[in-house]
Image (tube, rainbow, N blue to C red):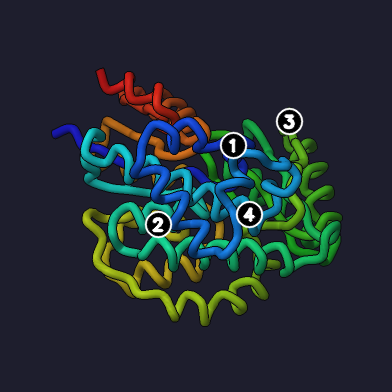
Amino acid sequence: MNKVAWLFPGQGSQAVGMGVALAAAEPAAQAVLTAADEALGFPLSQLMAEGPEETLKLTEHTQPAILTHSLMVVRAWAERLPAPDFAAGHSLGEYSALVALGALDFAAAVRTVRERGRAMQQAVPVGVGAMAALLNMSQADVEASCAEAAAATGQVVVPANFNGPGQIVIAGHAGAVEAAMEAAKARGCRKAVKLPVSAPFHSPLMGPAQAHMEPFLQGLSFATPRCPLVNNVDALAVSEPEALRDGLRRQIPGAVRWQATLDLLLDQGVTTFLELGPGKVLAGLVKRQAKERGMEVSALSFGAPEDLAQLG
């Protein structure tokens, strides 16, 4: 049986102009924008439409903007898209997935992710932390490089995002990340790229952000989702409300296990993947991972009116 998964993008997929065409074409999408502005008490819709880019890129703005765009797609096209058997979201995208599945209220979620963005940015002073992508390396070699660098520097550096085969992001103290990049090159890594981010997300250095978010997460009301969510921190399908809350809590300092998430979905018989929101990153990761496993799947991205033509 062919199954469907809805996927929701995370930070990095934002762009000035996001959602503008969709809001103009679909009244339901415009209603989501209006609801976001009301919930936040400032014109997020104007920032999404007009920028400036540097302001949109601030984590406290990026996170609610991406959540809002994803929900614009869901509310506008839910009746036309194949219904999901599973859903998953990359980091921030887990909130989008939970709102889309009816497990979280949109207004509460958009306020929470704005606070999450602030907390993650403030957890580590700018310049103290860093992130880097190590390409075409095994998980074991990345972990060994991080362990070597941590021992040599006395600082924190860990795998933060397992995005796909040969695509692993590390995070931690800036000096330890540099040392891990050198250790990785010594192990044969041909490409190690520092990422243009201002904080070491999904590392133990996010502990203060996790503590800050605790009362906000405790204050959220969760319902049972319409289908299981495959969470980031365990790469397990979960539906129980307290398990959903716990996953959001632990994902702040925990690694994003995206490769394992896609493996689970593929093992469960998912052959149609729909990326809902800005960008096409997740659809690309699906195609690559399925190809490496010798599997044929459909991976489509929906974020603008013209994307509906993909449904035929």
> Horizontally, is 220 left or right of 195 in the view?
left
For residue 60, say whether it is visible: yes
The label nearer to you, 3 versus 4, is 4
Question: Could you tell me how far apart the alpha carbons at marks 2 and 1 are, in whole angstroms?
Answer: 19 Å
Question: Element type at marker 2?
Answer: loop
Give neighbour class at mark 2: few <14, some 14-19, many 20+ (Cα, 10 Å).
many
Dot placed on the residue nearer the N-terminal end, 2 or 1: 1
- Residue at which label 1 appears: 167
Q: Quadrant of the C terminus?
A: top left
Dot placed on the residue nearer the N-terminal end, 3 or 2: 3
Question: Could you tell me how far apart the alpha carbons at marks 1 and 4 are, in whole angstroms?
Answer: 26 Å
- Badge 2 amino acid: Asn
- Residue at which label 3 appears: 191
- Badge 3 amino acid: Lys
Question: Could you tell me how far apart the alpha carbons at marks 3 and 4 are, in whole angstroms?
Answer: 31 Å
Question: Could you tell me how far apart the alpha carbons at marks 3 and 1 are, in whole angstroms?
Answer: 10 Å
Dot placed on the residue nearer the N-terminal end, 3 or 4: 4
- Badge 4 amino acid: His
Estimate the x, y position of residue 159 in percent, counting from the top left.
63, 52
**Rendered image quadrant of residue 107:** bottom left
Give neighbour class at mark 3: few <14, some 14-19, many 20+ (Cα, 10 Å).
few
- Residue at which label 4 appears: 61
Please name the residue shown 51% across and 54% down the image.
92
